[in-house]
Amino acid sequence: MAAGAEVPFETTAEHACFGGVQRFCRHTSAVIGLPMRFAVYQPPKPSGAALVCLAGLTCTEETFAIKAGAQRVAAELGLTLLMPDTSPRATGIAGEDVEWDFGSGAGFYLDATAEPWARHFRMESWLLTEWLPLLVDALGLDAARIGITGHSMGGHGALTLALRHPGRFRSLSAFAPIAAPSTCPWGEKAFSRYLGEDRGTWAAHDASALMRQARCPYPAGILVDQGLADKFLVEQLKPEALEAACSAADQPLTLRRHAGYDHGYFFIQSVVADHLRWHAERLG
Amino acid sequence: MAAGAEVPFETTAEHACFGGVQRFCRHTSAVIGLPMRFAVYQPPKPSGAALVCLAGLTCTEETFAIKAGAQRVAAELGLTLLMPDTSPRATGIAGEDVEWDFGSGAGFYLDATAEPWARHFRMESWLLTEWLPLLVDALGLDAARIGITGHSMGGHGALTLALRHPGRFRSLSAFAPIAAPSTCPWGEKAFSRYLGEDRGTWAAHDASALMRQARCPYPAGILVDQGLADKFLVEQLKPEALEAACSAADQPLTLRRHAGYDHGYFFIQSVVADHLRWHAERLG
């Protein structure tokens, strides 16, 4: 914690890890109107730079912290890791826990506009206007040196939040992102219910559509890793849509396709060090 | 798999990981009389050496594979990782799933001699006479270059199996082991029910007691890491008992005490690379 700072969140567990501290935390979100959970890894010698790591469907704030194996390199680089939960929890909305790919654990990192989700499912506003400023302040981070990454639904979140908020995140990468959610079953299901049936509103939350409206938003490049044995590759992830959009936007994209790798964290841990180094180089 | 070998187990899941393969497997154990589960990590260029990694109370064959972050260094060293489940499952014995520190998930790596546990809870015989030979054969491992390590109850398992079977494991280490189970609550509970109330039988499964009967069984040393913020340290783990026994047995012991670290896998992942390198150096 920054010296003398009032800490506006509760640490529910903390564990020494590679000379730093892995914390699991909770705060009461005014934006969401409920308690929200998140994890933070603080390296032994923080550089002030931070990387937001967004997890995928069914995951929680624990998933990336436990399974990605990122702390070792974060400790080496002085990079703080910020890992939010993937949705509000216990909202009381009927059916919130019924489907693994919608509702709890599936917030899609956007603000729902359709009922009954619009009151609590406000992940984008929570992350950008409340959670991130809170952590920048409490942990003494440099707001100008924050990168973002994510896996699957979290890769969608990283790409769309970075493109929707120019200048907010200095570096950008993703693991097996849902790259064109307007045109895949996971995205169609989530967008039709969070945003409504008017597909005209969907493009604003679709990384490939957003990229086509942009002009090289990340001149230092975007890194995306994708396993070729990923069972969701063809129907749900569609990296080729992002690749085409980046090409149209003159956006340098390092899209690495890995033979034999699937969608899970054994893949992520195999490439996570490259992502952390990618961000650290761009965050200074 | 070794070319042409018949594979006497079923792979239920496999994941590419650091150029190798993380498998989750199952076979029908004649010794235990039930299906048994285990995990294997095969590095991209196996050296033939292997490390048995035993997990702790409540854990399964998945725990070390998912949380320890060992595959990266195993891949680098060419070390195969062998990770068994921590007990038989679904034995039908009344009460097997009731207690978190006894029964399912708490096999203590011994052969029970007391009823009703004696029929199925035969972890030591399973591991030594059935599972390890099966894997040596199926994976083309060098039976003379196998090390053993483990965490907590698995640290107890590593130490006792190594000391009870001289020459079987060429290298030995442990993370926060239960070092003197005859004199701690976890061990007293398990031994009194698996082995019976006659404490005279317990010493044969107590690492510190076994070490006192030995004469420098590991001249190249034993590595033990222990966190000093481990809430089980004083009452359950007692590394000082092992330290005294090693001293009495002229056994070189590298016992590293780490300020601030607790009993969990954030600690293990922080030191796991040292253990893999320790074993690789001794396994050749």
Image: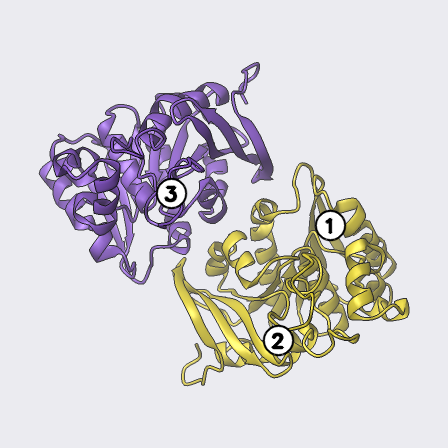
Chain colours: A yellow, B purple
At 39% from the left and 33% from the top, the residue drawn is B51
Give the residue type that dot 2 points to: Ala
* Labels 1 and 3 positioned on one and the same chain: no
The image quarter in which residue B150 lies: top left
* Labels 3 and 2 positioned on one and the same chain: no
Taking the image as drawn, is residue A131 in sight? yes
Quadrant where the C terminus of chain B sits is: top left
Observer-side mark, 1 or 3, equals 3
Residue, far front:
B94
Give the residue type that dot 1 points to: Leu
Residue B47 locus on image (x, y percent): 46, 26
At 62% from the left and 47% from the top, the residue drawn is A264
Label 2 secondary element: loop
Q: Is residue B2 left or right of residue B274?
A: right
Kindly report the distance in space between the C-alpha atoms of the residues bearing marks 1 and 3: 50 Å
Give the residue type that dot 3 points to: Glu
